[in-house]
Image (cartoon, rainbow, N blue to C red):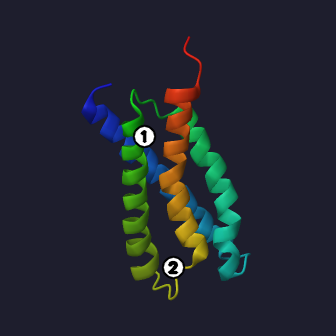
Amino acid sequence: MEKIKILKNTLFWGFILWLIGWFLGVVLFMVVPANLIGWVITPIGIIITLWVLFKKIEREEFMCFFGVGLIWTIMAVVLDYIFNVKLFNIENYYKLDIYLYYAFTFIMPLLVGWYKIKLKPKK
């Protein structure tokens, strides 16, 4: 895959995953107590992210998965800050669920990349 295509793929799926979580947060805000929203979204987000990583993200080297995790995490932090902390003026936004979300966003590409590159049997 050419590098520009890889970068576009990474940015596209990073934004889509963030947008899904953000949209779920807006919808759940109407029916779930605010302090539980992150805990409701997290399992859903993990499942969707794993699907994207296994089906839509193809990389040749393990370090490329490190790049995916790093870019997605930076995107999540910046977009959360702009659209949650600043736009919606959410006080006390950064709690354990958010820090776990950032950790999962970084770690899941590493784990899937390790599986795909190191453990998956070659055809």
Residue situated in front as seen by the camera: 81 or 100: 100
* Location of mark 2 (residue): 94
Q: Quadrant of the N terminus?
A: top left
Instruction: Check residue 38 in the rendering and tell me which mark sits there, or answer none.
Output: none
Q: Position of residue 16 (x, y in %)?
A: 48, 50
Q: Position of residue 15 (x, y in %)?
A: 43, 53
Residue 65, disc: 1
Quarter location, residue 52: top right
The residue under the point 27% across, 27% down is 2
Tell me which numbered mark, 2 or 1, is placed earlier along the sequence.
Answer: 1
| Amino acid type assigned to the residue bearing label 2 in the image | Tyr
121 vs 74, left or right, is right
- Residue at position x 36%, y 52% in the image: 71
Q: Is residue 37 left or right of residue 52?
A: right
Outermost top residue:
123
Q: Residues within 10 Å of mark 2 (few under 14, many from 20)?
A: few
Task: For marks 2 and 1, give the CA distance.
Answer: 26 Å
Instruction: Tell me: residue 78, above or below residue 66.
Output: below
Residue that protrudes farthest toward the front in the picture: 118
Categorize mark 1 by other alpha carbons within 10 Å: few (<14), some (14-19), many (20+): many
At 50% across and 44% down in the image, what residue appears?
Answer: 109
- Horizontal side of residue 102 vs 67, given as left or right: right
